[in-house]
Image: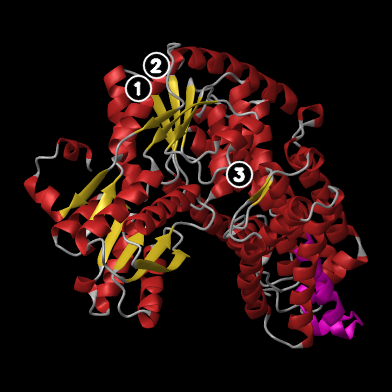
Amino acid sequence: MRNKLLMAVAAGLVASASTAAMAQDQIYGVLMKTLSNPFWGAMEEGVRDGAATIGVEYYLQAVESDQAAEPQLNVCNTMLERDPAVMITAAINSTILLPCLSRATEMGIPVVDLDGNLDHEIAEEAGVDIAFTIGSDNVAAGAQGAEYVVTVLGQDATGPVLVIEGLAGNITGQRRAQGFADRLAELAPGLEIVASLPGDWDRGRAANITNDILTRNPDLVAIFAANDGMALGAVEAAYAAGVGDDIVIVGVDGNSDAVESIQEGRLNASVAQLPYLVGAQAVEFASAVLAGEETPEFIQVPTLVLTQEILEEGSEPMLQYVR
Amino acid sequence: MTTAPDAAPKPRQNRFYFRIESLVVLVVLCIVMTLLSPFFLSTSNILNILLATATIGVLAIGATYVIASAGLDLSLGSVLGLSAVFGAFLVDRLGLPWPFGIVGALFAGFAAGYVNGQLITRLRIPAFIVTLGMLGIARGLALVISSGQAIYGLPSELVYLGQGRPFGIPMPVIIFFLVAVVTHYILAHTKYGKHTLVIGDNEQAARATGIQVERHRRSLYAFSGLMAGIAGLIFMTRVNAGDPTAGLNYELTAITAAIIGGTNLFGGRGSIFGTMIGALIMGVLQNGLNLMAVQSYYQQMAIGAVLIFAVWLDQFNRKVATR
């Protein structure tokens, strides 16, 4: 009795599922980290506008925080149930989504690496066929941060510098910190990185790190944080310690909080990643892949150093993509 | 606890306890999800739900035993992470043969639980404090062992445990099922299980009947650690990496599953069957909301509401029953 009922329900569902699948043939699956960060919010806007431009539907999911790794894998598996035309994913770390994405590859669903969170070699080994990676060059973003610091302080400047990295083990944060450190050593060898610590993308944690390092190095001249949230945490801690105006603080992302802080003259600069442009272009290139066109393996979306000056002038054409 | 008038332990009545309302909630939830999403009721999606529930489910078994004995283990999630890292460390970094991955993960979990039990019963430090301390120690140790980075790339034999699909069923689901059956049997049908519930119901009475309460408690924490070790093994092999951030905040989810399934937070009552229903309620809820592309924030709210609702149903019914 019960079995019969179940079977009847199941049969009905199979029928409705197949018609639904036909109707939603061109639905794009978009999996982000979390939306509780303006960076991902801006990227979502880009995805929305990009999808509207080319006239496709998309199905966007995210998890509760950018540390919820296994939940993201579970969501990824669930998304495959809807048989999306393409999976555009921003993985929380370079390995977590591989079991899901290799299944996507088996199902013939192209995989797009949003924001460069995957390692192409490891992914290939795991059986994931990445159509393309789109995002900003994080090493270059870090380097631009270093260039800005040197323009302000001068090539002959000396003094201690603090680097606040991302979540320990996160490749994006590592690349930004590395790009910064390498270029700084090249341009102004007198500036010494006295500490490079993981702030776990956490504003409060970054504030604590800043406090701690200020105790040890009260003459800190510059702080580079691998994202804006942490940079803003560092700004608060520096001003609370009364040295806010003496330290050049640079973040990465160019999110709305950071823009506001730069306009107020608190945060010195942010290397804007233009996530809006990344989201919009990801959808456009994905449709090109589905149409059978060739795309480059790595698509770099340029970054822009936002300062009070640039924001006030407002003439920089890329500013329209800053959200 | 609330059945004060007949203070003498009544294990026989408690032993098979699970909350029938939970089962009703689960069934209703499945029907609702089936109606709302055409993708819900398919074999592959049901396997998805079970796969997504496996880690939390095994962890919740540990939580059930400890809570049923009127104890608490807050270190479950961190110990999961430590186990995953330790297993991966032995085979990947030290190059030991693959069985050491299994032994290492289980051993690390067991050892952490063993230490918890010793500290709680011999030094008489409250379980809340000891396991809260272990939450920090195990997580920190996992980060130290792995240098803060996921240890990626396990031997294929180990990966099979997490990604293999004999008869189309994911291995983690099989492990989960076996563990659940064995632990259900122990709790419901053996002297060991009976003693666990008697201690949770009334420690004085348990002592009076000659149960070695301290020794029993020690073994329960070691058992709970072992469950975290199994969960860590599943996590590690599923994502093919020892991720030091694995299992962050899972202890609370595991406790939630146990409580929704009918375990009394103050001890004396609980069954693994009930806990499995509790874990599945959360799994189904999350999966269904994901299929409908509901934002993760609402999912957290929904799970919180179900927790309160399930316990309220129970209280309500018991009030009616005693009238």
Q: Identify whether B226 is placed above or below B231.
A: below
For label 2, count other residues whose C-alpha is less than 10 Å away and answer few (under 14), some (14-19) or many (20+): few
For mark 3, give the secondary structure. Answer: helix
Residue that numbered label 1 is attached to: A284
Q: Identify whether A320 is placed above or below A152.
A: above
The residue type indicated by label 2 comes to: Ala
From the viewer's perspective, tell me whether residue A249 is left or right of residue B234. left
Q: Does the residue at mark 1 contact the one at mark 2 (Cβ under 8 Å)?
A: yes
Q: Does the residue at mark 3 contact the one at mark 1 (Cβ under 8 Å)?
A: no
The stretch of residues the image draws in magenta is B197-226
Q: CA distance from mark 3 to mark 1?
A: 34 Å
For mark 1, give the secondary structure. Answer: helix
Residue that numbered label 2 is attached to: A288
User: Badge 2 sits on which subunit?
Assistant: A
- Who is closer to the viewer here, B8 or B48? B48
Residue depicted at x 27% and y 28%: A49
